[in-house]
Every structure is written in C-alpha cells, then in structure tokens.
Amino acid sequence: MVDLHKKIENLRKTIHQNKDFAIDYMSDTKNWVCIHTTKYAPKRNDADKLYIKTTAMATDYKLPRATIHVTLNQVVGNHIGGSWDTASIVILAPYNDVISQNNNPQEVAAEDTYFIPNPDTGLILPDTTYIIQPSSDNKELFTIGEKGATYKTDQYTPEEVEEILSLSDWDKSQYEEYLSGNIPEYEIESILGYDEKLIQTYQNSEDKKAFMRGILEEDRFIILNKLLRDAVVKLSLEEMGYHYIFAHEDIVSAKIANVATDSGLRGNSGNKGHSSTLEYETDLQGCALAKLSEVLNSQNPDKICKHLANTHIPMRNEVISSILSDTPIPDTYQVFIEVAKSKNVNLSDYNAHLDTTLHRHADKITEECNNALNKIKQNPENYAKLKQRLKQQQDMAPPTYIYSNSSNR
C-alpha cells in the first residue's frame, strides 16, 4: 500500500497546493473527466454501448427530469439538492469522448456540468469509461484495474479503518471527534443530507451532540465508505492518466467556465448549476404535476381539496373546472408552454430533447389524472363531496405557473 499512499500525496502536492497548475491543467478540455456519482449502474443498449438513463427515462416519465449531471475531475459534494454519501457507484469518462458520443452539455461548471441527452438513448458512454463500484467479493480493501475499480463497503478491520483514514484527508483523531458528535454547526445540514424533518428534529433536540452521536453511530460505515470511495476515485483517475482537482477553488471554476464560453457553450463559474434555467423550472413544474396525480389517485376528497387549495399548484383552476363540469382535465403540457413563455423562449427551439421529455411526461400525467378522476366518479358519494368542497374554492386567486416550493426537489 506504500506506493498508493505516495501517489495520493504526490497528487496533493501537485494540485492541492498549486493553484496555478490546476488552472493550467483545466484550461484544456482534453484533461477534463466527467464524474457521475450514482446508486445505479449504467445499462447496455442493443449496440452493447453503456448508457445512463435520465430520471424521466428511469421513471417511465412519471418524473420530468431530462438532465444528467456530472462534476469535472472531482467527486460531487453534498448540497441543498441532495446528499451523495450513499451513492456507491462512480462513473468516470473523458469529457471529449463523452461529447463525441452525445450532444454538447447544456451548461458547464466545475461542480455541476449537465447534459440533456436524447430520451430515446440516454447519455451514451464512450469505450474509455471507467466504473468504480462496491464489491462484496473484495478481499482487499480496494482493487484498481485498467477498466474499473472495486472497493469494500463493510466489515472493516481496525487496520482497514486506519488505512481508509490515511488514504483520505482525515486522521484518526478527526474521525473519532466526528463520531463523538462534536461537529461544526455549518456542517450539520450537509451531514443530515439536507433532510428538512431531520434538521428540524436536530434543532429541537435538547442534547444536540447526543443526537448527532446517534446519527453518526448508525452512519459510521457510510462515512468510511465515502472516504474510501473518494480515495479510489483519485487513484482511478491517475490510472486513467488524469488528475483529480482537490480544491474547489473559485479561480479554477472560473477558468473552466471561461474555456466553455470560449467554445460557444454556456459556462457557469458560480457552480450553482441550472437553478435559474428553463430546464430547472420545468423540472419543478413537472414534479408538482406528478404530486397532483398522486393526490388525485388517493381518491380522498379531503386530501384533494386541501391540495387544490394551494393557489400555486399548476393546473389548479383547470382541474377544479374539469371536476365541476364533468369534463376531462386538459393536456398538462400547457404548463410547460407557460414556463417557456415566462423565459421568452419556444421549447422546441430551446432544446428538442427537453421538449420531447416534457411531452412524454405531460402525456403520462394527463392520462393518470383523468384515470384518477374516472375512478373517483365510480363512488358517487365521494364525488359529490369533492364537488361540493371545490365549489367553495372556485373563486380563489388563479395559480402562478412557477412552482415556488423548491424543497420538493
């Protein structure tokens, strides 16, 4: 293992301590590697090519998300959009090879580059793809191969725990301090996976350190797995002939964004991803429509009325009108047309793959909503109760089309 430690240390000295090297290195796209951290292994298509499905594809368009996100030369960190600590599979693929198989990314950022792939194919992975995944068969702590790597995820011996810590930026005292629950306040939300209910429970607890000790005792293997996974990513990049960028430096992010912009792409130096874009807002709207379908399928008049009392629900007025007039709910795709209008764009012109995904999502949701209404009508008593309650809500203000509850993301 000594050689591996030296490799890690050399990488730290080369990049972590030398910002100029990182800037120069990331100024050429031939050095970029797309890193996709996930719980799901890529599939193979009929041509025996590996590919990644969008969330929309994976859920048969129940959810609308048309994007696939990667980081460049680094593992994704936790943020308000979610936690990746338990995502055990890491897919590494040279950036130039990825775009040769697909369209260009919709946006480039060091910590959130994303593609909108063809929904009929997903994101096609090149033959140079390198996959890191856990293996219960591993006798060694990890194995680095030419095409992929595996690592152990449980039953660590005390010696292996020390080995994992030595391969990471942690030391034993830091790890023990962490498990004791003595954690800086600014790290709490990230550790709790930005789970609002869990964060609220933590904030209301009388002994916050004891609360965190309980959480971390359950999650200590998750912590070790993440540290080992990330170390294996760094070693695997070197095996592929690339460098890991340790520091998430603003100046490095700015260089990556500038390179993208100079290439005619949309570069984002702020690493805030697509939070203000059309694809993000259609994603939120689609999730709200999926929730509407779920509520209608509950067949519960009280639950349906309570949901439709929220004036921000997309299609709220149309759904109420359809129930009261005994007519079908109209095509929910109109919600996305309204979002696009608010951005002064035409969906099909903006991105044909996004438009196709949203059409398929809208078709599914519209059908589900109308099927749910037909089931409710089969219970005349329930349906009469629903109509009576909704008449009282009919005069409420019309909905805004931009769904405001971003916590559903």
Image (cartoon, helix red, strand yellow):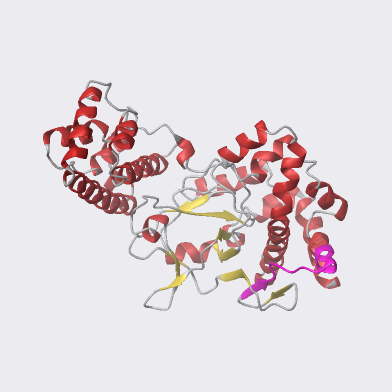
Q: With 80 as the anchor, is 19 left or right in this view?
A: right
Q: With 123 as the anchor, is 241 left or right in this view?
A: right
Q: With 276 as the anchor, is 224 left or right in this view?
A: right
Residue drawn 74% across the image and 69% down it = 155
Name the foreground residue: 65 vs 356: 65
Find residue 72 and report its horizontal and vertical position in percent. 59, 55
Find residue 365 and report its horizontal and vertical position in percent. 27, 49
Q: With 48 as the anchor, is 70 left or right in this view?
A: right
Residue drawn 62% across the image and 74% down it = 148
Corner quadrant of residue 199: top right
Q: Is residue 294 above or below residue 321?
A: below
Residue drawn 83% across the image and 47% down it = 177
Q: Is residue 136 above or below residue 391?
A: below
**Residue 373 among those drawn in magenta:** no
Name the foreground residue: 322 vs 164: 322
Find residue 156 and report its horizontal and vertical position in percent. 77, 68
Residue stretch in magenta: 148-163
Corner quadrant of residue 321: top left
Corner quadrant of residue 403: top left
Name the foreground residue: 198 vs 64: 198
Observer able to see residue 344 = no
Farthest-out residue, front: 381
Find residue 222 and report its horizontal and vertical position in percent. 68, 57
Image quadrant in which the N terminus is located: bottom right
Q: Is residue 145 above or below residue 64?
A: below
Residue drawn 81% across the image and 52% down it = 175
